[in-house]
Amino acid sequence: MAEDEYIRPGTTPETLAKLRPAFADAGSVTAGNASGINDDAAAVVLMRTAEAARRRLRPLARIASWAQAGVDPAVMGTGPIPASQRAVAKAGWRLAELDLIEANEAFAAQAPAVNRELGLDAERVNVNGGAIALGHPIGASGARILVTLLHEMARRRQGLGHALHRRGHGHRTVHRGSISIMARLALVTGGTRGIGAAIATALRDAGHRVAVTYAHNEDAAARFRAASGVPAYRWDVADYATCVAGVGAVVAEHGPVDILINNAGITRDSTLHRMTPKIWGEVIATNLTSCFNMCRCVIETMRVQRFGRIVNIGSINGQAGQYGQVNYAAAKSGIHGFNKALALEGASHGITVNAIAPGYVDTDMVAAVPQRVLDKIIATVPVGRLGQPAEIARGVVFLVAEDAAFITGATLSINGGQHMY
Ligand code: NDP
C-alpha cells in the first residue's frame, strides 16, 4: 500500500469539528475520529501443538487463554475491559506483565478509556498504529490485529502479548473477544552461573520466557538477575519437597513449564577407597535424583498440554568415566537410562527428552580443577581448548525448538571431539 486510504488532504480542526455526530445527536463520535473501513485481509492458521509438529510447522505463538464479555450498548467501546481482565486472569498473568497489546480502536475516545481502565501503558499498545491510522477491515480486524501482534512480538523477541477486538453485537449487549498469547516458559535449574546462565540467556534470546533456579550463591543470582532480567528462584533441586514448592511458585507466577532444563550439578571428587557415603549421596542427589524431582513436578502438565521439552545435562565423564569421580560418573551416566525410559513414556504426548553431554567447559566447576590436571585434559581435546558455556547453550536451543519433535531419547555430545561414540 503506497498511501493510506483515509488521508483527507486539507483537513483542519475546524472542518473536523463541523462533522455530524454518528450516533447520539450531541455525541462526539464522527467520521473524523473513527476508524475508516478498508479493504484488507489477514489469515491465521490455528492447530494443536501435536498437529503442528506432525506437519513440521513452527508456530508463531500459543494461545494461553481467551474470554469474551458483554456490556451495555450505551458504553459498547468499553467491551474490551472486562474481556481482557478475564482472559489475562485465566492465563494466570497480570496486565502489567504484558509486553505488547493490540487493541482494535473503533473510535478515538475508546483507546484512552480502555488504556486507563486497564492501567495499560500507551507505549505498549498498538505500537505500529491503531485502526484510526491503519483502517478497520470489517470482518478481518480480529485476524489483522493478531497478525500484527505476532510479528511485532517476534521482531522484538517478546513473550507476552494480548489482542482485543470486537466480536459481534446484539440488541442489548455488545460482546468483545480477547486473546492472550505467550511464548513457551523455560525453567533452567542452576541457571545463575556457568552453563546454566548461558542456557537461560540463549533461550531468552530465542524468544522464550525463562525462569532459573540456584542453590546458595545470592551474589551470583543478583548479578544474573540484574544483567539478564530473568527471574531467579532459590531452592535445592536435590530435595523433592522443595522442588514441589518451588515449581509451584514458578507456575503461580508465570504459568505452566513447557521446557525444563535440568542443569544444576556439583562435583565432590574422591577415589572410591576414600569416598564417604555423604559425598556419594550429595552428588547422586544433586545430579541425578534432581532429574526425577524436577521432571516429576512438570510431567503431568506436559502430558495434559501434549507438549514438553526436557533436556538433562549429562557429562563426558558419565560417558567415558573419570578417575576420582565414581559418584559423578554414576550420576551422569544414570541420566542416560532415565532419559531413554522417559522419552518412551513422553513420545505419544508430544514430550521429548534429550541429554547434552558437555566436555570440559570454562566455568567455576572447571576452575576448581588444578591447572596441571587441566593442562593434561586440554591436551586430549582435539579442538585444543575448553568449551564455552554458549556452545552448550546452542545445543539446548536446538533441542527445545517446536520443530525438534522427532528428536527424543538422544544424547548430543558437545566436547570438542574429546570423546566420540
Ligand atoms: P557451576 O558450578 O558453574 O554452576 C552450577 C549451578 O548449579 C549454579 O547455579 C548452582 O547454584 C546450581 N546448583 C548447584 N547445586 C544445586 C542444588 N542442589 N540446587 C539448585 N541449584 C544448584 O556449574 P557448570 O555451569 O560448570 O555446570 C552445569 C552443568 O553442566 C552441571 O550439571 C555439570 O555437571 C555439567 N557439566 C559441566 C561441565 C564443565 O566442564 N563445566 C562438563 C560436563 C558437564 P549456586 O550458584 O547457588 O551454587
Image: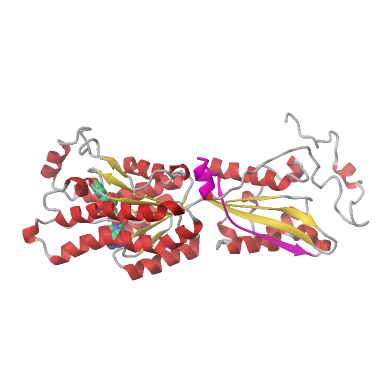
Quadrant of the image occupied by residue 279: bottom left
Say which residue appears at 74% left-offset and 41% top-offset: 133
Rendered image coloring scheme:
secondary structure
Residue farthest to the left, as pictured: 273
The image shows residue 235 at horizontal and vertical percentages of 34, 65
User: Where is ligand 1, by quadrant?
Assistant: bottom left
Would residue 182 appear left or right of 220 to someone viewing this image?
right
Q: Nearer the viewer, residue 273 or 164?
A: 273
| Magenta stretch, residue numbers | 50-71
Q: In the picture shown, does residue 9 fall above or below 152? A: above
The image shows residue 371 at horizontal and vertical percentages of 13, 44
Residue farthest to the top, as pictured: 2
Quadrant of the frame with the C terminus? top left
Q: Nearer the viewer, residue 107 or 274?
A: 274
Say which residue appears at 44% left-offset and 67% top-offset: 248
The image shows residue 43 at horizontal and vertical percentages of 67, 41
Q: Nearer the viewer, residue 133 or 417?
A: 417
Would residue 37 appear left or right of 150 to someone viewing this image?
right
- Can residue 217 be seen at all in this image of the molecule? no
The image shows residue 39 at horizontal and vertical percentages of 78, 37
Q: Nearer the viewer, residue 350 or 375?
A: 350
* 69 in magenta: yes
- Can residue 2 be seen at all in this image of the molecule? yes
Quadrant of the image occupied by residue 189: bottom left
* 269 in magenta: no
Say which residue appears at 46% left-offset and 58% top-offset: 303
